[in-house]
Image (cartoon, helix red, strand yellow):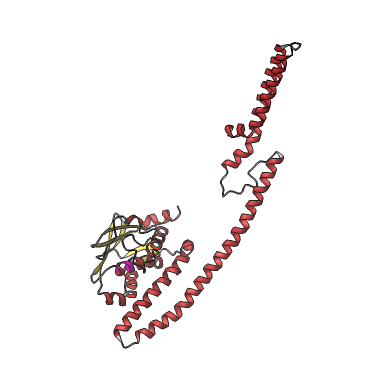
């Protein structure tokens, strides 16, 4: 701050120095003037000028030091202590700018909320004809065509489901209902929804659930499992998908293992990034890069730790570690 002050007041200091040099020059050229008296005057004036500079530095920089340290998110209306006319002008402009940004932010929040509500309403409206379409497809007599149409219907259904939950995730804390949830029921429901797709690809499931109950939100846990199972089915050929749960150090561990194409080593750290689809399969235009990202966001809200291990050509293992039941309340309040 001292350097900035000197830079700001450099013209004053330079003017004073030139003025003192001028006085010394006059005393040197005019023999009728005692040079010692001139030097004494220059010394005293320099001393007082130095004291003046120190006082002005303390007074003038106080306001700007406060401005420099204040957080951008803090309301500065009652924090900054403006004293001089120029400081008052600066303070008034900052307050006006902050008020304007608050008004703009309020408008954007209202607009965002309205857009979210419109999209949620649209998704719910689309689900009705989708359900009707599913019933019509299931009544078709051509088995091959029925399977193909059910697969396309399922893709639309999953995309809408992703959009629905993506809009709800920012407000997930208001929607959580933590209770004892049965893994068998949750996983069976998700597997059942993928039944036609699995039959078409020749994929089966092997469930071994030693630990059946977990303390979590069943609806949001179902969403996480849906994303992991969908990926497992999408990137696997005819094979088994192994799902098992067990207790480890008083924590429930749920694992989902497929034997599909796997994930490239350089991609593993990025699979939970928003919009990331893979560096090895850019031709896969069906991938949105949102499923695992959303699953990770939900898992963090549920205090579930997701780990992944994968080998190209051999498959992928996702592991979900649930917090201890007696720690859930403590974690939820952090």
Residue 16: image quadrant is: top right
Residue drawn at x 61%, y 49% is 75
Query: Which image quadrant for residue 108?
Result: bottom right
Q: Residue furthest right?
A: 32
Q: Give coordinates of residue 307: x percent, y percent.
A: 32, 57
Task: Specify the segment rendered in magenta.
Answer: 228-232
In this view, which residue lies farthest toward the front?
Answer: 29
Q: On the rendered structure, is 40 left or right of 132?
A: right
Image x and y of residue 283, in percent: 34, 66
Q: Specify whether residue 62 is in view.
A: yes
Most foreground residue, 84 or 138: 84
User: Looking at the image, which is closer to me, 285 or 234?
Assistant: 285
**How many labels sit on residues?**
0
Eyeballing the image, is 100 above or below 188?
A: above
Q: Nearer the viewer, residue 30 or 231?
A: 30
Does the magenta stretch mainly form a helix, a strand or a loop? helix
Residue 231 lies within the magenta run: yes
Residue 323 visible = no
- Say left or right for 278 vs 207: right
Measuring from the top left, give residue 100's x and y in whole percent. 64, 55
Location of the N terminus by quadrant is: top right
Residue at the image point whose x is 70% and y is 24% from the top: 19
Q: Is residue 169 left or right of residue 115?
A: left
Q: Quadrant of residue 301?
A: bottom left
* Residue 76 % position (x, y): 62, 47
Q: In the rendered structure, does residue 78 fall within the stretch colored magenta?
A: no
Q: Residue at x 40, y 68 (%)?
A: 219
34 above or below 125? above
């Amino acid at each position: 701050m001292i350097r900035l002050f000197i830079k700001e007041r450099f013209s004053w200091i330079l003017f004073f120095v030139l003025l003192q040099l001028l006085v010394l020059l006059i005393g040197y050229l005019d023999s009728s003037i005692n040079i010692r008296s001139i030097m004494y005057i220059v010394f005293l004036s320099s001393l007082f000028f130095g004291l003046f500079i120190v006082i002005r530095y303390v007074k003038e920089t106080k306001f700007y030091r406060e401005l420099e340290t204040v957080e951008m998110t803090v309301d500065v209306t009652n924090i900054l202590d403006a004293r001089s006319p120029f400081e008052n002008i600066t303070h008034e402009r900052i307050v006006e700018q902050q008020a304007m940004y608050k008004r703009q932010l309020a408008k954007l929040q209202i607009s965002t909320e309205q857009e979210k509500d419109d999209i949620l309403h649209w998704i719910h409206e689309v689900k009705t004809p989708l359900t009707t379409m599913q019933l019509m497809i299931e009544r078709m007599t051509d088995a091959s065509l029925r399977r193909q149409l059910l697969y396309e219907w399922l893709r639309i259904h999953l995309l809408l489901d992703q959009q629905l939950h993506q809009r709800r995730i920012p407000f997930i804390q208001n929607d959580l209902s933590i209770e004892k949830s049965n893994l068998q029921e949750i996983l069976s429901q998700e597997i059942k929804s993928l039944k036609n797709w699995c039959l078409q690809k020749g994929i089966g499931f092997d469930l071994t659930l030693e630990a059946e109950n977990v303390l979590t939100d069943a609806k949001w846990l179902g969403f996480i499992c849906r994303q992991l199972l969908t990926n497992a089915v999408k990137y696997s050929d005819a094979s088994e998908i192994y799902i098992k749960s067990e207790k480890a150090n008083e924590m429930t561990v749920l694992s989902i293992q497929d034997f599909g194409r796997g994930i490239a080593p350089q991609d593993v750290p990025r699979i939970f990034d928003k919009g990331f689809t893979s560096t090895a399969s850019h031709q896969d235009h069906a991938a949105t890069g949102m499923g695992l990202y959303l699953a990770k966001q939900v898992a963090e809200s549920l205090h579930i730790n997701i780990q992944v291990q994968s080998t190209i050509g051999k498959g992928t293992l996702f592991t979900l570690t649930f917090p201890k039941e007696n720690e859930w309340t403590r974690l939820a309040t952090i």
